[in-house]
Image (cartoon, coloured by chain):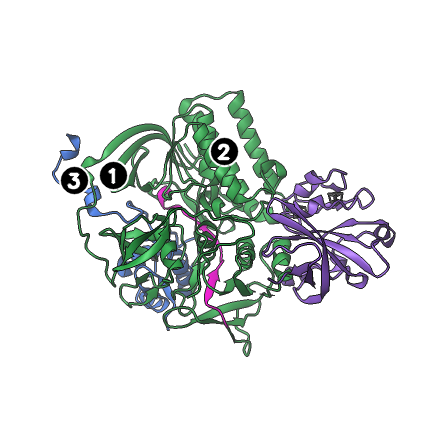
Amino acid sequence: MIDYEKTGVVKKGDIDVPDDERLEKGPVVVIECVENIPCDPCVAVCNFGAIDMDEITDVPDIDFEECTGCALCVTECPGLAIFVVDCSYSEEKCKVTMPYEYLPVPEEGDEVTALNRKGEEVQKAKVTNVRQSGKTYALTLEIDKENVWDVRGVEVKR
Amino acid sequence: MTERRIFEHPIIDFDRGEEFYFDFEGRKVKAYEGETIASALYADGLTKFTESKKLERPRGFFCAIGKCSSCNMSVNGRPHVRTCVTQVEEGMKVKRHGAKPDFPEKDIGRGKDRTEKDVEFAIIGGGPAGLMAAITAAELGGDVHLFDEGADLGGQLVKQTHQFFGSHEEDAGVRGIKIGDDLVEEAKKRGVNIHPETKVIGYYEDRKIAVERNGRFEVYQTEGIVYAGGAIENYLAFENNDLPGVYGAGGVQTLMNEEGVVPGEKVLMVGSGNVGLIVSYQLLQAGVEVVEVIEALPEIGGYQVHASKIRRAGVPINTSHTIVKALGDEKVEGAVVHEVDEQWNKIEGTEREIDCDIICLAVGLRPDTGFLRQAGCEMEYIPELGGQVPLRTEEMRTTERSIYVAGDSAGIEEATVAALEGKLAGVAAYEEITGKENEKTESLKKEAKDGIEKMRKGPYGQVPRQGVKTCTVDEEVCG
Amino acid sequence: MTTMVCRCEDLTEDDIVEAIEDGYDEMEKLKRHLRLGMGPCQGKSCTLLAERILCRETGKDIQEVAEPTARPPSQPVPFSLLASPKRGEQDE
Ligand code: SF4
Ligand code: SF4
Ligand code: FES
Ligand code: FES
């Protein structure tokens, strides 16, 4: 049995990730959707043809070179499984964009708690961007570079 | 008592109607127009809805969709009214039954003004399957009547606040609530005669159906029927499993997402299929704490993406765990769980208590087939489809002539499949009854069949695929 | 210990097991003997649990212990709904 089947928590090794060279170039998508489920809105929403599937039950096949990191897909995925990471941001810091559907909705500049895939606190982080699409938000957090593969959630206090 | 009504929600805007009062056992209780009696009472703090008839145990609601009868009360003198599907009205007089229901205070049946009507198509059930069947048959020119017990149609779609999976062509990425509303609009536009708040109470020979509406008995002589009565939530055996606070996951979802009322403060979710995972997420969105999700099997039942979503919010999921007891006297005050091995045996020393006030059961659904059994349809037990289902042709006809089935009543599957089955049943019924087969009907059938096939691909589709294979029979068998 | 099987008719797991031991070893017999499944929900909540207990106690396969016959009315309705005050009056 693969770990996530028991825990619901994926590891970096379970997913397809861009190589270091691509990461340094600018924002790029990270998709944490690893099972063959009947779902494909991510394919349709990408204007750059970066996500592909033959069958609706395939896992998304990502062309990291085509991806511009626009993050449109982040708010479109019903599984809330799509993130965008930007390691080109600065020496020490990077950015992670993630979907958010809770209350309260933070504002740009707010300090929030960045969480890992188990909901544990990783660090405090600053919100650098808030975008709304329907009822789903995409929040961009500024975090330490070393945490780029850990931070996948956020807690916003009232 | 903290306020149980939700006023701020990240996804849903609850526009409550006018505020008014009704009478509950001599006390004035606040309600908003559009609420059901059960949700207004629950929002007011009531947990004990009935007392059981022999053992006099307190009972809460359970399914919240009119299937289980746990919420029955006496309303304006009429006993055994399902309060979870009956809208509250100003000045209404509501009373709990004692251990035995009351004798009706007045003559509420109007047997003598029964009516009888001829209609072409009767569609039973206003969920995605029923609505699609109605829309399709009406679009082709049929005289279509759609019956549903609730005041609002849309079936269980109405409480799905999450975006849909599936293909973007079939509304994936759109929230269930919206799809439900759109289908109802479409049905109205196509001229479907919608009969809300109308209970179908029986099937009689030669495709006659009997319904009750507002105390009145009506008989419809139909030429064809599509039954889309949906599903029933499974119940689970453990000590004190009938305490108020043990609720079906679908019931919690209805209360929370349709009625805007939270079930409690701390929830133990039993079952990690997609329903358990999605309802957990929706509880978190409504600001309710989910203390833990437990699953008896060694692995999580639902999609990884749904599981990951709630894990990121800090909810633990414990597999190989089962519940043995609910704690509390008048309502749930905790639960006892323990670990099990692969043979379902208890692992000694793993028993522990969980602090919670709600135990939410997400242990599967079962097709609601009572009507079809009344109609004499041949049934078979298909575990892959959740229980007994009618045998049917590839085009959804049962073994009884002109009686079709679609959606969860034909086997438990996703809402998208239900809608497509409805479409298929709608066309096929139209063809059989009118004798009109043409390019249009052919192409509609093909669309539906292709869509269904697509949805059943992949490892998660393997189970229903296998099940459907077993209960699909040839045209000839169906006579 | 109260593990409820039929909420409507207040039948516990012990009641069902006892009845099976007394020889009521089919769903139809349990129904007639205990009123299992004959409450206002018409067996919607209890049938599955009862079938599972029956299988466990008798070693039967779930395929064999089919759901008992369904009859109208499938929902609670007042008797006066079905009955006419005077014979033939509905024809008037
Ligand atoms: S981030 Fe933009 S470009 Fe990249 S995959 Fe998503 S939608 Fe396509
Ligand atoms: S939309 Fe999201 S859940 Fe669906 S296939 Fe794409 S990544 Fe997976
Ligand atoms: S019928 Fe109302 S709670 Fe089940
Ligand atoms: S629970 Fe058994 S008849 Fe309702």
Q: Is residue B144 magenta?
A: no
Residues in magenta?
B355-372
Q: Which chain is green?
A: B
Q: Is residue B189 above or below residue C56?
A: above
Give percent across and percent down for residue A91.
Answer: 86, 59
Question: In the image as oriented, which residue stretches furthest toward the right?
Answer: A21
Q: Chain of mark 1?
A: B
- Circles 1 and 3: CB distance less than 8 Å? no
- Residue C5's tag is none
Q: Are marks 2 and 1 on the same chain?
A: yes
Q: Nearer the viewer, residue C61 or B276?
A: B276
Q: How many residues crowd mark 1 within 10 Å: few (<14), some (14–19), many (20+)? A: many
The C terminus of chain A sits in image quarter: bottom right
The picture's colour for chain A is purple
The amino acid sitting under disc 1 is: Phe
Question: In the image as oriented, which residue stretches furthest toward the bottom?
Answer: B349
